Amino acid sequence: QVQLVESGGGSVQAGESLRLSCGFSGHEFLLYCLAWFRQAPGKEREGVAVIYTGGGSTVVADSVKGRFAISQDQSENTVSLQMNSLKFEDTAMYYCAARRKRGYSCRSFTDFNYWGQGTQVTVSS
């Protein structure tokens, strides 16, 4: 059974940075697409970034493009989300998610079926 554990959330001022990490276990890391989602109170869950493990190709949502980056560490079976120039509107619960790869790309935020417990990011203006 795939397990995902997030860490690294916290409270920061606008303009500061945070780095979230997600530990993957329970199956072969390279068989999965890994992604970060977020959900703010009263809003729908939003896909933030997704990575094709191994090859490393990524997709980042327009709302965070240029500020957020997703990366992988195959030796540790982790994915990270580097968040720079944080804004008040980035405040949300951030979740790591996984799904089995289909083909040779991980370019969508659909059909993720394994989820971590989430880590809170709060940005004060």
Image: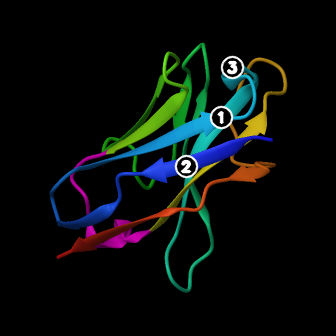
Q: Which residue is mark 3?
A: 30
Q: Quadrant of the N terminus?
A: top right
Which amino acid lies under the numbered mark 1 shown in the image of this protein?
Answer: Ser
Q: Is residue 124 left or right of residue 92?
A: left
Q: Residues within 10 Å of mark 2 (few under 14, many from 20)?
A: some
As drawn, the residue found furthest toward the bottom would be: 42
**Label 2: element kind:** strand
Query: Which residue lies at the image location 69% right of the left edge and 47% below the top edge?
Result: 109
Query: Vertical placement of 107 versus 109: above or below?
Result: above
Q: Residues within 10 Å of mark 1 (few under 14, many from 20)?
A: some
**Label 3: element kind:** helix
Q: Is residue 10 left or right of residue 100?
A: left
- In front here: 44 or 63? 44
Query: Which residue lies at the image location 49% right of the left edge and 16% below the top edge?
Result: 75
Which amino acid lies under the numbered mark 2 shown in the image of this protein?
Answer: Val
- Mark 2 touching mark 1, by CB under 8 A? yes
Q: Which residue is mark 2?
A: 5
- Label drawn at residue 25: 1
